[in-house]
Image (cartoon, rainbow, N blue to C red):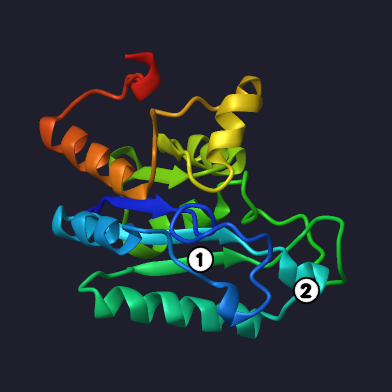
Amino acid sequence: MTQRAIFLDRDGTISEEVGYVNHLSRYRLMPNSLEAIRIANGAGFKVIVTTNQSGVARGYFSESLVHQVHARLTGWAEAAGARLDAIYFCPHHPQEGAPPYRAACDCRKPRPGMILRAAREHGLDLARCYAVGDGLVDLEAAAAAGVPGVLVLTGYGRGLVEHQRERLRAQPLRIVEDLLEAVRFIVGRDSQGRDANRIPAAGER
């Protein structure tokens, strides 16, 4: 049986955007993120994180640190009664660093490689999935995979909407304040069987 999932960006969506998380102490969750994940779990969605981590290619930190951060995130989720079904990250950059990290890969967002890999490995029906993120690359990766994207105003999202909205080539299904509002919207929309037409953002109603 095919499954449905919500793909979540990490920094700026689940956790605070601090630039590069080059030390475990710099990794901090956004308020309500774990509640949002728990709601998605309860609604029958797999929750899968997809995140660009080019700091590895740039030499700012190692893959080991990325795994430590993800272990902490997974632990926090479990302690709160929430579940992350998978975490995918791209350590590459097309111009920075040295091989194997300097690479024009298919996993670095805005390319859809992480989403497509997750779909294969978890038996996902992408027509029933959603993606949530705070940046252009999140929306574009989702669109390239045929998945509707929801833009949050945390992280880089608010600045993107207020100052660079013309760059939104992949239009979001909805623009919301944070991950909790995004998940509540997705769960509500899914339960009502709405079509895939874009729903106006709060400021447009």
Q: Quadrant of the N terminus?
A: bottom left
**Which mark identifies residue 60?**
2
Counting from the top left corner in percent of width and height, residue 176 is at: 38, 35
User: Residue 63, relative to residue 177: is it above or below?
Assistant: below
User: Residue 44, relative to residue 143: is it above or below?
Assistant: below
Amino acid bearing label 1 = Tyr
Q: Quadrant of residue 137?
A: top right
Neighbour class for label 1 at 10 Å: few (<14), some, many (≥20)?
some
**Which mark identifies residue 175?**
none
Question: Looking at the image, which residue is at 64% across and 70% down?
Answer: 21
Question: Looking at the image, which residue is at 53% across and 53% down?
Answer: 12
Depth check: 115 or 178 in front? 178
Counting from the top left corner in percent of width and height, residue 88 is at: 51, 66
Question: Looking at the image, which residue is at 24% across and 54% down?
Answer: 3
Q: Is there any visible trace of residue 169 in the rendered image?
A: no
The extreme top residue here reads 205
What SS does tag 1 mark?
Answer: strand
Neighbour class for label 2 at 10 Å: few (<14), some, many (≥20)?
few
Counting from the top left corner in percent of width and height, residue 201 is at: 37, 23
What SS does tag 2 mark?
Answer: loop
Q: Is there any visible trace of residue 154 in the rendered image?
A: yes
Alpha carbons under labels 1 and 2: distance apart: 19 Å
Amino acid bearing label 2 = Tyr
Question: Looking at the image, which residue is at 33% across and 68% down?
Answer: 84
Determine which residue is flagged by label 1: 88
Q: Is residue 20 left or right of residue 149?
A: right
Q: Is residue 79 left or right of residue 72?
A: left
Counting from the top left corner in percent of width and height, residue 94 is at: 81, 55
